[in-house]
Amino acid sequence: MTMKLVCKNVLWDKRESYFFPIPEFMTYYGEKLPTPKWVESDAICISAGEIPSKMRIIPRSMIVSIDDEAQAPVAVSAIKTLIVQGDKGKSYVVTINGKLKTCTCTGYSFRRTCKHIIAAS
Ligand SMILES: [Zn+2]
């Protein structure tokens, strides 16, 4: 079944720096695909047409409508930022945005999780 997704255009905010007109919204059509494990944020994956292995990953916060049904905007207030004290006296910034959790420590950059995130959750 083909879905129709209308999304905010990421270039819209920077439209003044382009010589060609930037549309505010983009419309994509594709088959809904399962979201791969490595996609960290809450996103919808659809096939990108011609090339079967290609897919588009669209974060829910960018989606305006699905099959012409308007989607409730994701509240910005859902993003929480916490300062977590590490054991060597350093402090790290943990950001929690729904299911997406990030940390500024080096452990996070390798493992995509760390004790600061666990401590902040
Ligand atoms: Zn960390």
Image (cartoon, rainbow, N blue to C red):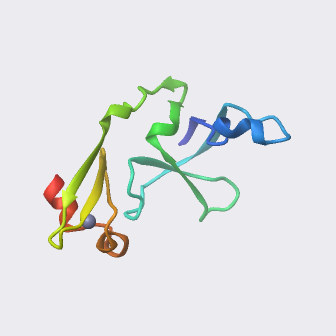
Which residue lies at the image location 70% right of the left edge and 57% below the top edge?
Answer: 50
Q: Nearer the viewer, residue 66 or 120?
A: 120
Q: Nearer the viewer, residue 93 or 35?
A: 93
Please tell me whether residue 8 is drawn above or below residue 117 in the rendered image: above
Q: What x and y, as percent, mark residue 90?
A: 23, 67
Which residue lies at the image location 18% right of the left edge and 73% below the top edge?
Answer: 88
Q: What x and y, as percent, mark residue 93?
A: 29, 56
Instruction: Classify residue 23 as left or right of residue 10.
Output: right
Instruction: Classify residue 94 as left or right of residue 9.
Output: left
Q: What x and y, as percent, mark residue 39?
A: 42, 59
Which residue lies at the image location 66% right of the left edge and 36% below the top edge?
Answer: 12
Please tell me whether residue 88 is drawn above or below residue 31 in the rendered image: below
Q: Nearer the viewer, residue 88 or 110?
A: 88
Which residue lies at the image location 48% right of the left edge and 23% below the top edge?
Answer: 70
Please tell me whether residue 99 is drawn above or below residue 91 in the rendered image: above
Please identify the residue farthest to the right as the structure is shown: 19
Tell me which corner region of the image, top left, top right, bottom left or bottom right, holds residue 55. bottom right
